[in-house]
Image (tube, grey):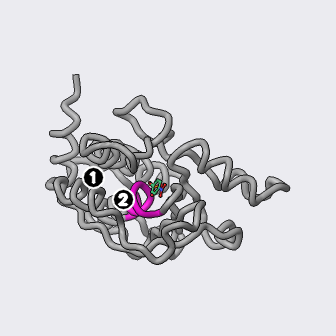
Amino acid sequence: MINYVRLSAALLTQPSLFFNRIRSPNNMPKSYKLLFVCLGNICRSPSAENIMNHLIEQAGMSEKISCDSAGTGGYHIGAAPDRRMTAAAERRGITLKGQARQFHKSDFEKFDLILAMDRDNYQDILSLDPGGKYQDKVKLMCDFATHHREKEVPDPYYGGTEGFDNVIDLLLDACEGLLHYVVKADA
Ligand code: 4NP
């Protein structure tokens, strides 16, 4: 069975083990824009954004892929990432930066891919696109995980430390899969 904590640690310290089969990013458009979306934009989506930025930097693709995050709700607009989420990310060597903002329908045009953390977020995003014009841009984050079976990134807000650690491990897996997808989709 895969030791996922070890795998994640190796991913962080030796990214070339994972990314040396990725083709050169030279053929990609100047910037492929990813938007991560959860409910509050203080736990899951800023974690996804910062983990993804970390992997993108390690893969030397910062000029080719950019990330942002947003919440479907507006309760935490302007807030920094949750301190429990920040501590969990630090335990995996990731620093969380950012300030919460709310998803807006103009984001459909601004981003190439919109990643929802759970099905509620997914439905709330799609409800802003009643004509379905942007439906293909919106995907569930967990569809990119290859080592975890969860279909949604669970909301850790009302739970304990373990839930926050689980979010980080799940997102490390999903972000790794997402990076491969983005590079392949653009090949
Ligand atoms: P997030 O977590 O959607 O991952 O940022 C939550 C943050 C705040 C609340 C719920 C979930 N809240 O109820 O305030």
Comparing 38 with 28, the one in front is 38
List x then y, in percent, for residue 49: 40, 63
Q: Is residue 96 left or right of residue 156?
A: left
42 inside magenta stretch: yes
Residue on which disc 2 sits? 47
**Is the distance from the Cβ of mark 2 to the nearest ligand 1 atom less than 8 Å?**
yes
* Residue type (three-letter) at the residue carrying disc 2: Ser
Q: Amino acid at mark 1?
A: Asn
50 in relation to 110, above or below: above
Magenta span main SS: helix
Left or right: 183, with 114 as reference point: left
In the picture as drawn, the residue positioned furthest to the right comes out as: 131
* Residue assigned mark 1: 20
Task: Find out whether residue 136 is within the magenta segment.
Answer: no
Q: Is residue 18 above or below residue 113?
A: above
Q: Which residues are magenta?
A: 41-49
Residue 175 sits above or below residue 63 on the image: above
